[in-house]
Image (cartoon, rainbow, N blue to C red):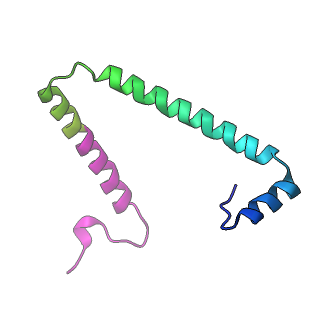
């Protein structure tokens, strides 16, 4: 579904295509929101009883892992020099 700058465009689109695309999109959005809510609640439950030290250690480990993955992705791109090959 696309965004329409003018209300009459949305009305015309509904006349041409019917309401089903809108119903499908609404159902997909509802399912996505429910899944995200469930994931957020599970994450909160999993980390609810963490101490500050445990949380800081977990966040640092996640950050290092993400940086490692991003660095590998950047170095693996064709046409771009690797981090050690850059010349200033």
In the image, farthest residue toward the right: 16
Residue numbers of the magenta segment: 62-88
Residue 54 to residue 49: above or below: below
Percent across and percent down for residue 75 are: 34, 61
Which of 68 and 4 lies nearest the eye of the viewer? 4
Residue 87 to residue 19: above or below: below
Residue 6 to residue 70: above or below: below
What secondary structure is the magenta-colored segment mainly?
helix
Is 28 displayed left or right of 33 in the figure? right
Which of 49 and 26 lies nearest the eye of the viewer? 26
Is 1 displayed left or right of 75 in the figure? right
Percent across and percent down for residue 68 are: 28, 49
Q: Quarter holding the N terminus?
A: bottom right
Count the labels in the image: 0
Q: Is residue 83 magenta?
A: yes
Percent across and percent down for residue 82 are: 30, 66
Which of 70 and 85 lies nearest the eye of the viewer? 70
Q: Residue at x 22, y 67 (%)?
A: 84
Can you tell which quarter of the image residue 70 is in?
A: bottom left
Q: Is residue 25 magenta?
A: no
Percent across and percent down for residue 19 are: 81, 46
In the image, farthest residue toward the front: 7
Q: Residue at x 81, y 44 (%)?
A: 20
Q: Residue at x 82, y 61 (%)?
A: 12
Q: Residue at x 77, y 47 (%)?
A: 21
Q: Quarter holding the C terminus?
A: bottom left
In the image, farthest residue toward the left: 53
Can you tell which quarter of the image residue 58 is in?
A: top left
């Amino acid at each position: 579904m696309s965004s329409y700058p003018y209300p009459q465009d949305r009305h015309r689109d509904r006349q041409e295509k019917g309401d089903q695309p809108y119903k499908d999109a609404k159902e997909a959005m509802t399912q996505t929101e429910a899944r995200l809510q469930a994931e957020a609640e599970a994450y909160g439950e999993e980390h609810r009883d963490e101490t500050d030290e445990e949380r800081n250690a977990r966040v640092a480990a996640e950050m290092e892992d993400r940086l490692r993955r991003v660095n590998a992705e950047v170095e693996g791109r064709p046409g771009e020099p690797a981090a050690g090959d850059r010349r200033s």
